[in-house]
Image (cartoon, helix red, strand yellow):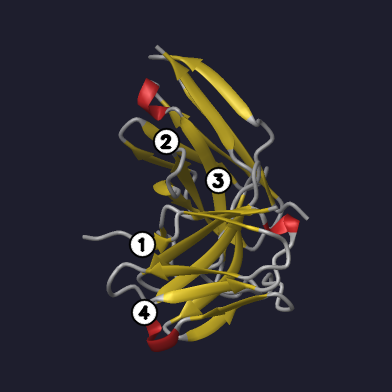
Amino acid sequence: DQQVKQNSPSLSVQEGRISILNCDYTNSMFDYFLWYKKYPAEGPTFLISISSIKDKNEDGRFTVFLNKSAKHLSLHIVPSQPGDSAVYFCAARPSRDGGTSYGKLTFGQGTILTVHP
Amino acid sequence: EAGVAQSPRYKIIEKRQSVAFWCNPISGHATLYWYQQILGQGPKLLIQFQNNGVVDDSQLPKDRFSAERLKGVDSTLKIQPAKLEDSAVYLCASSLSEGGYEQYFGPGTRLTVT
């Protein structure tokens, strides 16, 4: 039962262009969503997050959009840089009454982003 | 601020052998998590500790996996006996509290079972 899905295993983008990574979820008890970035041989690092009461959160070159009715979120990186090349994971956390441990994150499968110079 | 430390970084064992991983979280972080990441998949939570108590171990294969967090600081995860399908990266993470939306991850231990 894949509650968080990233349907694109990989994405290739030219430097300076926009990168759009997508994520879908099925569990309506999720109320907080996060994006993590992972370089080879390192652990994931937190990138940006959004609460379910918002539809957009921006931090520098990174913007996350949330469409609750479609149970869909996306991460936009603009402009993309070669250093952004990494695996990006979408993750979701349930609300306090979500029937499971509050801190439990459910991750998607990841999308490998390659930004070409 | 020191990050989450894990050791060893790499381990190769034969099936049916046992193995243990160690994690030292960020100082002051009450919540500690162990994740299993199989190649091509996202991290899957195995067990979550709040101080030295278990909050969630619903996805821990308890017939072969065990974990402890004595004194509420560092933690060990053990597999005994290992199976081929246990080959994965084992990630430890910590957060200030159970709300934990910002979890800080260690570099992981890559386990290969042959």
Q: Pinpoint the chain carrying mark 4.
A: B
Q: Residues within 10 Å of mark 3 (few under 14, many from 20)?
A: many
Give amino acid for label 1: Ala
- Does the rendering let one see residue B98? no
Q: Residues within 10 Å of mark 1 (few under 14, many from 20)?
A: some
Q: To which residue does mark 1 refer?
A: B5
Q: Which label's residue is closer to the chain start, 2 or 3?
A: 2
To which quarter of the image does residue A9 belong? Answer: top right
* Residue A90 circle label: 3
Q: Residue at x 36, y 69 (%)?
A: B25
Mark 4 and mark 2, same subunit?
Answer: no
Q: Secondary structure at mark 2?
A: strand
Q: Is residue A77 above or below residue A95?
A: above
- In the rendering, at what x and y percent does residue B106 appear? 41, 57
Q: Secondary structure at mark 3?
A: strand
Q: Pinpoint the chain carrying mark 3.
A: A
Q: To which residue does mark 2 refer?
A: A63
- In the rendering, at what x and y percent does residue B16 appear? 73, 67
Q: Are marks 1 and 2 in contact (CB under 8 Å)?
A: no
* Residue A65 circle label: none
Q: In front: A50, or A91? A: A91
Q: To which residue does mark 4 refer?
A: B73
Label 1 and label 2: CA atoms lie apart by 30 Å
Judged by depth in the image, the label closer to the viewer, 3 or 1, is 1
Q: Residues within 10 Å of mark 4 (few under 14, many from 20)?
A: some
Give amino acid for label 3: Cys
Q: Secondary structure at mark 1?
A: strand
To which quarter of the image does residue B22 belong? Answer: bottom left
